[in-house]
Amino acid sequence: MHDIRTIEAADTPGFYRELIAQAEGLLHDERDAVANAANLSALIYHAVADLNWAGFYFLKSANELVLGPFQGKVACVRIPVGKGVCGTAVAEGRSQLVPDVHAFAGHIACDAASRSELVVPVARDGAMIGVLDLDSPVPGRFTAEDQAGFEALAALYVAASDF
């Protein structure tokens, strides 16, 4: 059993070092991609401040993401590639850090309370698997340091999971 420990880091890089260490312990010796996505979503949701949604969307065809394990309110089930923040991350193959979702053309509002979003592509050997999606009710919640931390978590998830 894994208990989420309160992270008491003095700075953002220290916070992500501790979060990654907890994720390593959580994912150790488990290869199932769905189980790992579920547990990683729970860890993120409970350890990271000011989130109202944390989870995964998986690429089920060349044109569509489908909801995977998550924590938060009910969510949009299907997102076309190239649409919204998640679909844009897949289409462009890069993270999307959006300080104000209302200023993002084509934003898909699954939860009206969300004000900022960070979406990190999940890929193995250049092949897109899906995205890690984080929403916050706080405008400007995510920084470049957060992006780097969640990109490292996504890479850990990919390395720990069989697809």
Image (spheres, grey):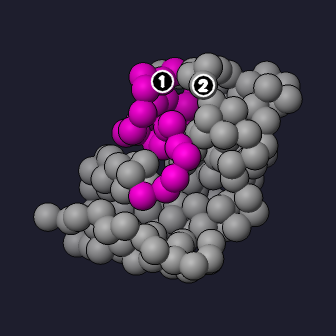
The type of residue carrying mark 1 is Ala
Query: Residue at position x 23%, y 64% from top?
Result: 3
Q: Residues within 10 Å of mark 1 (few under 14, many from 20)?
A: some
Determine the secondary structure under disc 1: loop
Residue 72: where, in percent of width, then height?
42, 33
Q: Say left or right for 46 vs 87.
A: left
Of 118 and 157, nearer the camera is 118
Of 80 and 14, nearer the camera is 14
Q: Which residues are magenta?
A: 47-76
Dominant secondary-structure state across the stretch colored magenta:
strand
Q: Measure how far apart labels 2 and 1 are at the Cα level.
A: 12 Å
Query: Residue at position x 60%, y 67% from top?
Result: 149
The reply to whether residue 124 is visible in this rendering is: no
Q: Sequence order check: which comes first, mark 2 or mark 1? A: 1
The type of residue carrying mark 2 is Ala
- Residue denoted by label 1: 75
Residue 40: where, in percent of width, then height?
38, 55
Determine whether 141 is above or below 23 in the image: above
Query: Residue at position x 62%, y 72% from top?
Result: 12
Q: Nearer the viewer, mark 2 or mark 1?
A: 2
Q: Residues within 10 Å of mark 2 (few under 14, many from 20)?
A: few
- Residue denoted by label 2: 113
Q: Quadrant of the rendered structure where residue 113 is?
A: top right
Q: How many marks?
A: 2
Query: Residue at position x 48%, y 24% from top?
Result: 75
Residue 65: where, in percent of width, then height?
55, 31
Residue 100: where, in percent of width, then height?
79, 36
Asked if marks 2 and 1 touch (Cβ < 8 Å), the reply is: no
Determine whether 21 is above or below 51 in the image: below
The reply to whether residue 118 is visible in this rendering is: yes
